[in-house]
Image: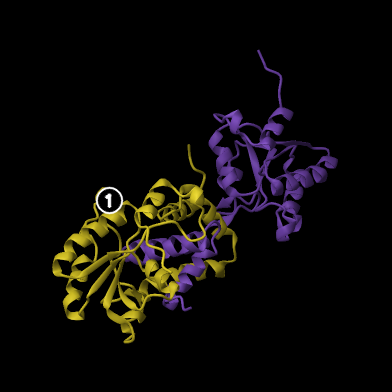
Chain colours: A yellow, B purple
Amino acid sequence: MASNYTAPVQTLIDELGRLPGIGPKSAQRIAFHLLKVPADEVTRLAASITDAKSRVRFCDRCFHVADGPLCPICADEGRDGRVLCVVEESRDVVALERTGEYRGRYHVLLGAMSPLEGIGPEQLKVRELVARIEPEGVEEIILCTNPNTEGEVTAMYLARLLKPIGLSVTRIASGLPVGGDLEYADELTLGRALEGRRAVED
Amino acid sequence: MASNYTAPVQTLIDELGRLPGIGPKSAQRIAFHLLKVPADEVTRLAASITDAKSRVRFCDRCFHVADGPLCPICADEGRDGRVLCVVEESRDVVALERTGEYRGRYHVLLGAMSPLEGIGPEQLKVRELVARIEPEGVEEIILCTNPNTEGEVTAMYLARLLKPIGLSVTRIASGLPVGGDLEYADELTLGRALEGRRAVED
């Protein structure tokens, strides 16, 4: 049965549907929204996409998003270069920066290992991570990949790779989310939270 | 605290976040996806947006998406012009067409009445609907707005407006979805399904 959409609409729906987290229904909804709103709003969206793509690059050193050769964090002389926080994506850097607790630097892998999707260490910025350690005098690496299968596999791989170099390699803690409810925590999180229990300080 | 995104990234996230159903987290995720994928994929998305916006228009008669003055349905002489199905959006036309059961024409309101959002009949294609009735010899109007608050209010309004003209005005049936489970139906749907019960035919 014909879809009854004219070709440009179908193309738009298809392209939107390729975005992460956008299913066919959402793609349709967004497409019709775009057809309905004023043209300048749509132009602004299209421009923001091409503009970001052409102007934004990844930091030469840590692969966080940047608008020059170095990102603001790598360019900041006040950051402690001895500690590297390894994350999957730039958005993780932003999340960690929001805590205001970390004064070291970052290394963005641009993904996580996923055998199912054919993503191994070669597809990630792992070689670049190892290459930074000596010249930058890195002493501790905190593995902050996500606490899911891909993130854990990546952390495990990196720990095995990096420990022999004689670095301190740590993993960010898993546990109950602050403000969360023990009753509603899934058993994996709860198990991890128990496993990671710490002595109560006076 | 600074967001640590460079300006073009923040602009992109903001623009994506204005789309329906895209929250700040999804906007971030899509933005970083776009920064990571090959440039030609991104160009294709931006082009599909501007292309659809510039080439697609609404049908002069029924306001379904079209690439000429009339949509394929209005241009089709074989459709029964005496029956008009009134829907909120173009995607509803496509959904109804998929059933293959309807041979009449459509009228797309381009939205539904919503006092909260300040959308009244003047913001919708209601005047245009009334104007079609006589010249096109419309005899029945099927109100196919969504079975939610806005859709019901719109249907009620249209029924009151159109009945005095001497037309047959019907409302699409509400009830249990086919393949659905009575046990899991919400009470409103169940109430409607009871209310709309029909004699079993031999």
Measured as percent of width and height from the top left, residue B87 is found at 65, 45
Task: Compare residues B152 and B191 and report the one nearer the observer.
Answer: B191
Q: Residue at x 64, y 53 (%)?
A: B60
**Residue receiving disc 1:** A117
Q: Is residue A65 left or right of residue A48?
A: left
Whether residue A43 is visible, yes or no, is yes
Measured as percent of width and height from the top left, residue B14 is found at 51, 69
Q: Is residue A118 left or right of residue B102?
A: left
Whether residue B75 is visible, yes or no, is no
Vertically, is A78 above or below A134?
below
Task: Compare residues A39 and A148 and report the one nearer the observer.
Answer: A148
Q: In the figure, residue B160 lies in which quadrant?
A: top right
Vertically, is A149 above or below B28?
above
The residue sitting at the front extreme is A202
Vertically, is A173 above or below A59?
above
Q: In the figure, residue B163 lies in which quadrant?
A: top right
Q: Which chain carries label 1?
A: A
Q: What element carries label 1?
A: helix
Task: Compare residues A74 and A104 and report the one nearer the observer.
Answer: A104
Vertically, is B156 above or below B13?
above
The residue sitting at the top extreme is B202
Measured as percent of width and height from the top left, residue A102 is found at 37, 75
